[in-house]
Amino acid sequence: MRNHTMVTEFILLGIPETEGLEIVLFLLFLSLYSCTLLGNVLILTAIISSSQLHTPMYFFLGNLSMFDLTFSSTTAPKMLLYLSGQSRSISFQGCVSQLFFYHFLGCTEGFLYTVMAYDRFVAICYPLRYMVIMNHKVCSILATGTWLGGSVHAIILTFLTFQLSYCGSNEVGYYFCDIPAILPLACGDTSLAQRVGFTNVGLLSLICLFLILVSYTCIGISISKIRSAEGRQRAFSTCSAHITAILCAYGPVIIIYLQPNPSALLGAIIQMLNNLVTPMLNPLIYSLRNKDVKSALRNVFAKRGLALENK
């Protein structure tokens, strides 16, 4: 029998087919990440500081902003470090943490979009009972359930991936620790982890997407029954931001799964869209056409300006 040295760290090889573009990618991703952090911090500040935004819809929007802040921070800081010329190595424990939080937050995103679709369904289809149905207790249970569900999902996948032995090559052919990039480096049988991972991720995504479609089908039927054009426009405007966010989140994933033989570069681009671009766009989507959010942000800046003047 041959002696094997157990892997204590991994080397991230980076984004496929992008050799020589490190400086350009560093500047691009740094600007995207900075905009993501700034936009979501502003949304959270507006929701917390304005009593007018203490409603179920904005409660879930605040959860989405927290998710966007943490999800983008799972992969972006390490990627920016090695694009700037620093070490590409990541410790074994760091790789475990990165994989766990990526799948924890990715699953939470699907659950959260589903809950937000249900919130819009209740608001449009049962407007008179909206605040009774979506009371504080129900909102807290739904939000807690999304985060707990995501953690259970991530624990299962992380355990199945890292209960295997890693004693060969430590070069990860990707820009972060994800299951398809890590499993080929394992010394043991990876079939169980591959089957459970593919089934778990695919099944949960399909269930969430199906429930979202059901919610918006019911919403569409209810809107079509509204007689006045102004009423239909008002009802649709309350859902347009959420629909746009869902398209940004699920659109790239659907595109890559429709490709018969997706390239490694295309897969990386799709994941970067989900990791950086969608979290950056969400604050713009929910604030540009939302008078309440824009008013709350103006009040925040006005108070800040007064505080600086008083000093």
Image (cartoon, helix red, strand yellow):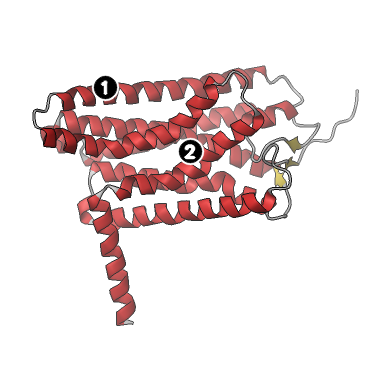
**Residue 203 appears at what percent x and percent y?**
47, 20
Query: Would you place residue 235 above or below residue 76 in this image?
Result: above
Q: Which residue does the numbered mark 2 point to in the structure image? A: 105
Q: Callout 2 environment at 10 Å: few (<14), some (14 to 19), or many (20+)? A: many
Q: Residue furthest bottom?
A: 311
Q: Amino acid at mark 1?
A: Thr
Q: Quadrant of residue 173?
A: top right
**Residue 148 appears at what percent x and percent y?**
42, 35
Q: Secondary structure at mark 1?
A: helix
Q: Quadrant of the N terminus?
A: top right
Q: Which residue does the numbered mark 1 point to in the structure image? A: 217
Image side of residue 295 versus residue 34, left or right: left
Q: Work out whether residue 145 can be spotted.
A: no
Q: Quadrant of residue 167?
A: top right
Query: Would you place residue 49 above or below residue 124 in this image?
Result: below
**Mark 1 and mark 2 in contact (Cβ < 8 Å)?**
no
Q: Nearer the viewer, residue 308 or 59?
A: 308
